[in-house]
Image: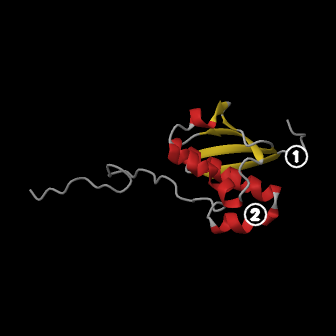
Amino acid sequence: MADKKAEIWTVGKRKSAIARVRLAPGSGNISVNERALEVYFPRDTSRMKILEPFELTETKGHYDVIVSVRGGGIAAQAEAVRHGISRALVVASEALRPALRKGGMLTRDPREVERKKYGRHKARKRPQYSKR
């Protein structure tokens, strides 16, 4: 295990999912909520999203990642982890910022679920119009 100074802690967010990411120099192991990446995220697309910052910056296999993620759904959690990893890579090496910025990894997606309004079925869906 790396010493405390080499560890980088960051937070990534997407919708209501929050991921706390710990990045340390290592062999490329990724664990999410004390489980392996393949066990927690069985979909290939989710794993691709999470590994995207490493592929953009060509640092795959250089860092061990330990993630604690909660809230939201599977897709939002995967994007929150990606956001946290991207932020941690920038802290580790400022030279990686342009590549991550160009790939859109550092921008926090601000879209949230719109609240339900009274008199509506959902946030915007109106009751069916009746002529008679």
In this rendering, the answer to whether 102 lies above or below 13 is below
SS type, badge 2? helix
Residue closest to the eye, 126 or 111: 111
Q: Which mark is residue 64?
A: none
Quadrant where the image shows the C terminus: bottom left
Q: Tell me which residue sits at (62%, 59%) in the image.
A: 108
Specify whether residue 16 is in view.
Answer: no
Q: Residue 35 in the image: x percent, y percent?
A: 64, 31
Specify whether residue 9 is in view.
Answer: yes
Res 29 → quadrant? top right
- What residue did someone put label 1 on? 6
Looking at numbered disc 1 in the image, what kind of residue is underneath it? Ala
Q: Residue 55 in the image: x percent, y percent?
A: 66, 56
Q: Tell me which residue sits at (64%, 33%) in the image.
A: 36
Q: Residue 96 in the image: x percent, y percent?
A: 75, 63
Question: How would you rate the neighbour count of disc 1 (Cα within 10 Å): few for under 14, some for 14-19, many for 20 or more?
Answer: few
- What residue did someone put label 2 on? 96
